[in-house]
Image (tube, rainbow, N blue to C red):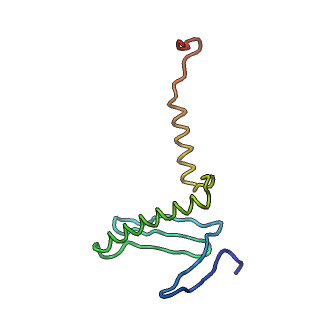
Amino acid sequence: MPDRGLDIDVIGSPGMLICWPGPDATAGVFGDQPGDEHLIMLLDPLALALTTPPQPTDRPAMARFLRELAHSATLMADRVDPTGQFQPSWATASANKQDESSAADTVKPAAGKQGRS
């Protein structure tokens, strides 16, 4: 297997998997009904899935963990890419859509009907 950021290192118990995402890495939430969501991280070449806990009493811990994960991931992204140049495709598509709607909402004065200074 070519070197694609895979480095397995067992530290302590239960151990720690250390790797970095490849060029085709992606993540998303999937599920067909509430309470049956899955956070899928395709790291290229590895995949990791977190599922909703089966017991409702375990869901607050899951929610806390996911919020910590989101916060930590944002901090790391800001350190890796401080300018914010590299954005996921969904973020750039959303920004482009907002730019188009903002341009459409801009009212331009008719020719020869300029406002007073």
**Residue name at image x 58 percent, y 71 percent:** 43
Above or below, comparing residue 17 to residue 101 in the picture = below
Which of the 4 quarters of the picture holds residue 33? bottom left
Above or below, comparing residue 17 to residue 94 in the picture = below
Q: Position of residue 55 (x, y in %)?
A: 30, 76
Task: Give the total number of marks visible in the rendering.
Answer: 0
Q: Position of residue 114 (x, y in %)?
A: 56, 14
Q: Spot the residue most to the left.
A: 57
Tell me if 62 is positioned left or right of 95 in this view: left
Which of the two residues, 39 or 64, is positioned nearer the viewer here?
Answer: 64
Tell me if 54 is positioned left or right of 99 in this view: left
Q: Position of residue 103 (x, y in %)?
A: 55, 33
**Residue name at image x 54 percent, y 18 percent:** 109
Q: Position of residue 56 (x, y in %)?
A: 28, 72
Which of the two residues, 25 or 14, is positioned nearer the viewer here?
Answer: 14
* Image quarter in which the N terminus is found: bottom right
**Residue name at image x 37 percent, y 67 percent:** 64
Q: Spot the residue most to the right.
A: 2
* Image quarter in which the C terminus is found: top right
Which of the 4 quarters of the picture holds residue 113? top right
